[in-house]
């Protein structure tokens, strides 16, 4: 058999039937077929340990795969033999210099170019590293071996990254399914709860209708009795007119007493009380959700402007006319009447409430926790601050991605603030009306903290619990849902 035919047959035996390329780190299955380790790993990634051979379809187990060093050596031999054959053929086909038509006998390492005797004459490649073809071929062959090893390692590293990414896809699928099951369970419980509350509400409504119907029936009976009594008095009056003067006057006193005792019953209103068909707020699933994320926020006195008095319990801040003699601190606001809250938030969901009073010119919200000294010494709001400013008849909302805009709302008494750090939202609610005021949307990348600002006419701002400030929102945390 010709040598070329033998080489072709050998190369065919050293190919992977998955990638159709030379075998890399070959492994052998139970049925005796060889594949690249990375190819077979990807092939059976989702088979949970068992797979069918890509060639004969025999059932195999991943744990029974064996590394085949001998086949790997055969692959390297075939590759080397193929390279030598190609090199010899190349030398046979191009042994003459195209420029001088001389035999190529040298190689320039600087220009990576084959040369003849005349190519290395005066002025050409004199200062370059020129070696014989044999020596250059030997050196570059060793370099190619290094390249091959480096490329193999890179392929393995890339394959490892690919496997890691595939694993994360599987983990994402698993986490999504787990959350889906959890949500399904939550909605089922919520559905059962709402069904029960609906039955209770309908029962209360029916009982109130029954009681009101009874009162209406009794009142109708009273009207009938009153009409009957009035008819009887009318009849007596007509008869008294026909009597003699003495007899008529003798009966006048008794008639007047009966007439004066005649009364008309009041109308009973036929209106169902609103509370009879309202769910108590504490039964709302969203109410429970907000309660789950309520946090205890306090004021940080070290950040307070010298005109701001922070209470001992760190729950209330009051604007003073005169500055206090407070110790110097790099954290303190020097021009803007601001105090920050504790703790800082860099993940999760958090809810707190602030009593704001009836007077205008205050602002609350959140801001970047790690503010620079320049931001604390500025008279304007920090660059990364998401706040609502009450001006007496409207809110001015401002944030890094929000231009100053005005919102007309009724005068608030308490403000509820809900922060969803991962979702990138901070929402404001007027309490206890549970009405949504505004939501900022921002991709938070660093810790944030509560923010409080007072101006000349502000009343004290007081942090309060939900029971102090009023009911929490039951209409949803996200106004767009």
Image: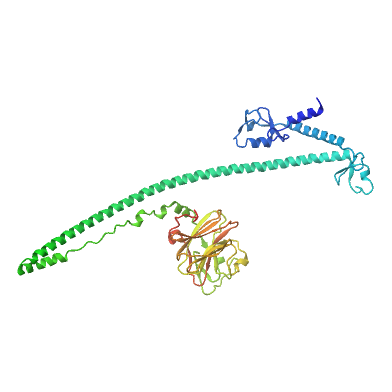
Left/right placement of residue 119 relative to residue 199 reads right
Left/right placement of residue 14 relative to residue 450 reads right
| Residue sitting farthest toward the bottom | 322
Residue found 13% across the figure and 61% down from its top:
232
| Residue sitting farthest toward the top | 1
Q: Is residue 70 visible from the viewing direction of this image? A: no
Q: How is the image coloured?
A: rainbow
Residue 424 percent location from the top left of the image:
56, 55
Q: Is residue 131 visible from the viewing direction of this image? A: yes
Nearer to me, 156 or 328: 156
Residue 449 percent location from the top left of the image:
55, 60
Q: Is residue 279 above or below residue 188?
A: below
Left/right placement of residue 145 relative to residue 455 reads right
Q: Quadrant of residue 263?
A: bottom left
Residue 307 percent location from the top left of the image:
54, 71
Q: Which quadrant, please, contains the N terminus?
A: top right
| Residue sitting farthest toward the right | 122
Residue 413 percent location from the top left of the image:
45, 64
Total marks in image: 0
Q: Is residue 213 above or below residue 30?
A: below
Nearer to me, 227 or 13: 227
């Amino acid at each position: 058999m010709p040598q070329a035919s033998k080489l072709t047959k050998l190369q065919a035996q050293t190919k992977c039937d998955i990638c159709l390329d030379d075998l890399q780190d070959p492994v052998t299955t139970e049925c005796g077929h060889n594949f690249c380790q990375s190819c077979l790993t990807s092939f059976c990634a989702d088979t949970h340990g068992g797979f069918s051979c890509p060639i004969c379809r025999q059932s195999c187990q991943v744990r029974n795969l064996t590394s085949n060093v001998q086949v790997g050596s055969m692959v390297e031999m075939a590759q080397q033999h193929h390279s030598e054959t190609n090199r010899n053929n190349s030398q046979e086909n191009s042994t003459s210099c195209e420029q001088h038509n001389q035999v190529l006998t040298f190689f320039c390492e600087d220009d990576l170019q084959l040369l003849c005797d005349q190519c290395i004459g005066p002025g050409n490649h004199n200062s370059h590293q020129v070696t014989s073809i044999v020596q250059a071929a030997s050196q570059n062959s060793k370099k190619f071996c290094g390249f091959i090893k480096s490329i193999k390692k890179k392929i393995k590293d890339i394959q490892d990254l690919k496997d890691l990414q595939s694993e994360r896809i599987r983990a994402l699928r698993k986490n999504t399914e787990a959350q889906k099951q959890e949500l399904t369970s939550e909605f089922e419980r919520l559905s059962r709860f709402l069904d029960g509350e609906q039955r209770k509400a309908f029962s209360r409504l029916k009982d109130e209708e029954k009681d009101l119907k009874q009162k209406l029936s009794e009142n109708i009976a009273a009207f009938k009795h009153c009409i009957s009594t009035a008819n009887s008095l009318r009849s007596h009056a007509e008869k008294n007119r026909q009597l003699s003067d003495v007899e008529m006057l003798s009966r006048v006193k008794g008639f007047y007493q009966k007439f004066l005792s005649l009364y008309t019953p009041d109308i009973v209103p036929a209106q169902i009380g609103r509370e009879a068909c309202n769910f108590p707020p504490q039964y709302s699933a969203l109410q429970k959700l907000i309660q789950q994320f309520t946090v205890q926020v306090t004021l940080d006195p070290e950040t307070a402007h010298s005109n701001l008095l922070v209470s001992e319990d760190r729950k209330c801040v009051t604007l003073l006319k005169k500055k206090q003699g407070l110790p110097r601190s790099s954290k303190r606001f020097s021009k803007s009447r601001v105090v920050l809250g504790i703790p800082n938030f860099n993940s999760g969901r958090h809810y707190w409430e602030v009593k704001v009073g009836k007077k205008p010119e205050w602002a609350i919200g959140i801001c970047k926790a790690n503010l620079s000294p320049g931001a604390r010494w500025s008279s304007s709001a920090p660059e990364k601050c998401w706040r609502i400013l009450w001006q007496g008849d409207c809110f001015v909302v401002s944030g890094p991605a929000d231009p100053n805009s005005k919102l007309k709302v009724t005068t608030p008494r308490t403000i509820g603030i809900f922060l969803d750090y991962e979702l990138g939202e901070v929402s404001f609610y007027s309490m206890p009306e549970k009405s949504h005021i505004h939501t900022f949307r921002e991709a938070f990348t660093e810790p944030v903290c509560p923010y409080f600002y007072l101006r000349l006419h502000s009343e004290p701002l007081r942090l309060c619990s939900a029971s102090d400030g009023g009911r929490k929102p039951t209409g949803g945390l996200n106004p767009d849902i």
